[in-house]
Amino acid sequence: MKAPSGETSAAGHRLALRGIGVRFGGLTALDGVSLDVAPGQVVGVIGPNGAGKTTLFNVVCGLVRPTSGTLELNGARLVPQPHRLAGLGVVRTLQGVGLFRGLTVLENVMTGATCTARAGFLSGLLALPRGDRDERRLREEAMALLERFGVAGYAAALPGTLPYAVGKRVALARALAARPRLLLLDEPAGGLGAQDIEELAELITTLPREAGCSVMLVEHHMDLVMRVCDRIAVLDFGRLIADGTPDEVRENPAVTEAYLGAEAEETPFAAEATPLAQEAAA
């Protein structure tokens, strides 16, 4: 898979989280989390189950309102609202596939690009006035993305007929069709086989350069995280316990303790024997 070559050559948005806290009743989901995603960086968020990773993502997306702390986008205060994020260049993928089941693959990818069009494909679905020139451009751009992702042969297919790995590629293509400046990937490797994960890793590493976006991802596949991320943030019980380069995080005893009680041979980094991990360590 190859990232699209968009018109924007800049390296993407800067996201800053400062002292983010979230409480659900008596439960503290996040406790004073501060994190930066610099332009052009790929930043991973990892941690054991229940550490607060999804809550942190939902704060950035506006699905959860923090009880304390602030967010900034390019130095300006950000109060995320889900329906306005795409217009700010912030796009999120879902843990699964999340495609519109009643639309074809091509139409799904076209919906991702409507936020950059003056008159978009969605207006056509709603029988609203639209520009034929815009719609032709959307179709051409969407088809080009499908070709780059190697799934152009599925353009006329419905999501329910797709192999899971193909559906994940289509979902990523739809996200990139929106020309994000900050791309939020929620477990992008979930459910994928080894070869698909290899191709995904190759894609993610090219995004800052070729798509002009910063990337923040939550992922459980540690070999993928260690290869593609410039920095890794580790959460445990809602607190940030480590933030550094992959090598720094790998050697951090607090991370080992958080995962498996300091049994180093059982940490998520100890069994890095896949081709991805071997390449990252080379």
Image (cartoon, helix red, strand yellow):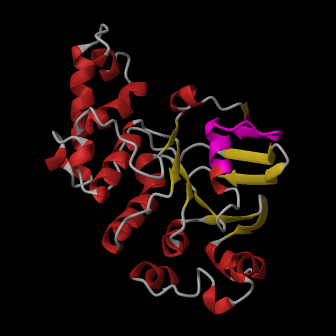
The one of 7 and 17 positioned closer to us in this rendering: 17
Depth order, front residue of 185/164: 164
Look at the picture and state if 153 lies above or below 187: above
The structure residue drawn at horizontal position 49% and vertical position 79%, both measured from the top left corner, is: 280
> Residue 132: x percent and y percent?
22, 15
Q: Residue 216: percent from the left, percent from the top? A: 57, 53
Task: Please state the extent of the stretch shown in magenta in the rendering.
Answer: 55-76
Q: So how many labels did they put on this image?
A: 0
The relative height of residue 275 versus residue 245 in the rendered view (above or below) is: below
Q: Quadrant of the N terminus?
A: bottom left
Question: Does the segment drawn in magenta span residue 71?
Answer: yes
Left of 84 or right of it: where is 73? right
Asked which quadrant contains residue 82, the reply is top right
Q: Residue at x 27, y 20 (%)?
A: 134
89 lies above or below 200: above
Q: Residue furthest front?
A: 26
Residue 53 appears in the picture as rendered:
yes
Q: Quadrant for residue 65, please give it.
A: top right
Residue 278 belongs to magenta span: no
Residue 33, position in %: x, y?
Answer: 79, 53
88 lies left or right of 74: left
**Residue ranking furthest to the top:** 129
| Left or right of residue 114: residue 21 | right
Q: At 45% from the left edge and 57% from the top edge, which residue is drawn?
A: 188
Which residue is drawn at the image coordinates 42% and 47% (left, top)? 211
Regarding residue 1, the answer to whether it shows in the image is: no
User: Residue 90 location in percent, x, y?
Assistant: 54, 38
User: Looking at the picture, does residue 181 appear above or below residue 247?
Assistant: above
Question: Looking at the image, which residue sits at the far bottom?
Answer: 265
